[in-house]
Image: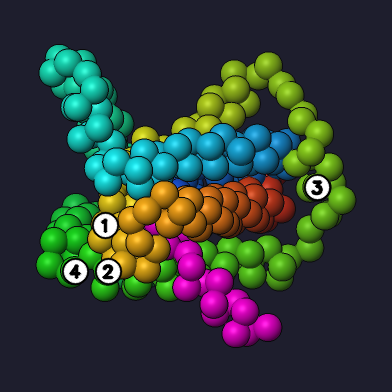
Amino acid sequence: MFSWLRRDFKKLGPGLITGASDDDPSGIATYSQAGAGFGFSTLWGILLTLPLMIAVQEMCARIAIVTKRGLVANIRRRHSRPFVFWVVLSFLIANVINIGADLGMMASAIQLLIPSPFFGVLLIVGLLTLSLQIFIPYHTYARVLKWLTLSLLAYVGVALTISIHWGEALRSTVLPVWSWNKNYLLIIVALLGATISPYLYFWQASQEVEESHETDGVYGKNHHSLWRKLKAMRFDVGFGMTFSNIVAWFIVVSAAVVLDGHGYV
């Protein structure tokens, strides 16, 4: 069994890493707020986003694998310069806001463990993250990130240590409980934004381009080998997005049980 798991784990790459990165600090904060503020009633949103995530990320991966270019390079080849400028600017703004929220959440988490000035910790975290991406070769960094995805299983472990009404949680997942309350609608929109994040599109495509330099030697470059590569990518993306949403589901459930009704939102 362990040899099977190890063999299949080796097949995973950009899809798993991108899916795990979706459970970033800002996403975790959103899932926690959903559970703390609305209990199990938002769980159906986690299930709803799964096929959407798989479809979008697979589309980005397919574009990168077939063209061997990232999304921006493909957009630039197909559209006018003004259109490319506004598209890139829109994604830049969305990504900068998302990254800023992630860095802020990481700094706040460190402050819980080590009393320290927020902006000082924020600067250190930002510089460390940037340095790792600049100075560590892609494949070395990707291998480390791949193993770090397993740390997200801690959220599953936490849920298994508390008393949860599993029947109610599963029922709320498959049977939507809708409310026209303004705060409820806002948290549903936040869930959609937290799971289908703009930076994931570029990350997925860029990783596929990087991976193609290595996998071309494994799969070859003819049409048959391309289909094998696409098949492997579909498994990778499907597994990665499913893993991401399972972790998100457990975060919402844990927050609903522990924080709901205790004034934490």
Q: Which of marks 1 and 3 is in front?
A: 1
Query: Does the CB distance between marks 2 and 4 fall below 8 Å?
Result: yes
Magenta segment: 1-16
Q: Counting residues from the N terminus, which is met first, the one under dot 2 or under dot 1?
A: 2
**Residue topped by disc 2:** 139
Dot 2 falls on a residue whose secondary structure is: helix
Residue count near mark 2 (Cα–Cα under 10 Å), binned few <14, some 14–19, many ≥20: few
Which residue is label 1 attached to? 210
Report the amino acid beneath label 4: Pro
- Name the residue located 27 percent from the left edge and 46 percent from the top edge: 68
Secondary element under disc 1, as helix, strand or loop, is helix
Residue appearing at x 29%, y 41% in the figure: 67
Instruction: Name the residue that disc number 4 marks.
Output: 137
> Is residue 242 shown left or right of residue 151?
right
* Chain-order first, disc 2 or disc 3: 2
| Amino acid on which disc 2 is placed | His
Along the line of sight, the residue nearer the viewer: 160 or 37: 160
Query: Quick check: marks 2 and 1 in contact, CB under 8 Å?
Result: yes
Give how far across and how far down residue 183 sits, in percent: 58, 24
Give the answer, above or below, for where 262 lies relative to 188: below
Tell me if I can see residue 81 in this picture: yes
Q: Disc 4 or 3, which lies upstream in sequence? A: 4
Quadrant in which residue 120 is drawn: bottom left
Q: Mark 3 points at which residue?
A: 170
Q: Please tell me whether residue 13 is drawn above or below residue 170 in the rendered image.
A: below
Against 209, residue 147 (above or below) is below
Label 1 – label 3 distance at C-alpha: 39 Å
Spatial CA distance of label 1 from label 4 is 11 Å
